[in-house]
Image (cartoon, helix red, strand yellow):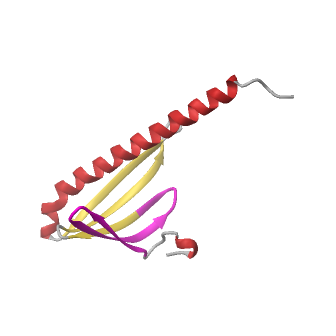
């Protein structure tokens, strides 16, 4: 971990989601471009790369690619895919809400009379 508690290559963390404990290790860290992590749980090990790409509309496309390590991991792969899709849908909702809030603030500011 870098100074100030920021994530970097080699950072370990533990995520507890209900009864599942997931160990995450950052394998490669390129902020604002991509990161690669290894997730280990009772269902196996998976290596995932999350990439952020600009689209033609000025937005960002999030792409997640992964592979399972070992036979046991293949069984948990479908569940991992469902979980990642749910996480990305939640992220999309949060970002949409923030964009709506920003737009409302901009409209409100534009409606205010200009002070002298």
Q: Can residue 104 be found in the magenta stretch?
A: no
Q: Position of residue 81 (x, y in %)?
A: 23, 53
Against 8, is 85 above or below?
above
Q: Which residues are magenta?
A: 11-35
Measured as percent of width and height from the top left, residue 27 is found at 39, 71
Is residue 15 in the magenta section?
A: yes
User: Residue at point 39% right, 57% down?
Assistant: 50
Left or right of residue 105: residue 114: right
Q: Is residue 58 visible?
A: yes
- Residue 94 lies in quadrant: top left
List the single residue furthest toward the right. Answer: 116
Q: Residue at x 52, y 72 (%)?
A: 5
Quarter of the image with the C terminus is: top right
Residue 66: percent from left, percent from top: 29, 59
Q: Nearer the viewer, residue 14 or 38?
A: 14
Image position, residue 23 (x, y; %): 30, 71
Residue ID at (23%, 57%)? 80
Residue 57 visible at all: no
Please give the count of numbered marks on the rendered protein.
0
């Amino acid at each position: 971990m870098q100074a100030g508690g920021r994530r970097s290559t080699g950072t370990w963390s533990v995520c507890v989601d209900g009864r599942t404990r997931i160990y995450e290790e950052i394998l490669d860290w390129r902020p604002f471009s991509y990161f690669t992590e290894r997730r280990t749980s009772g269902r196996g090990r998976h290596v995932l790369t999350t990439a952020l790409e600009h689209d033609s509309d000025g937005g960002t496309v999030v792409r997640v690619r992964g592979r399972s390590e070992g036979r046991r991991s293949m069984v948990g792969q479908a569940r991992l895919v469902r979980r990642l899709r749910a996480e990305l849908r939640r992220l999309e909702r949060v970002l949409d809400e923030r964009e709506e809030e920003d737009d409302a603030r901009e409209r409100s500011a534009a409606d205010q009379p200009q002070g002298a």
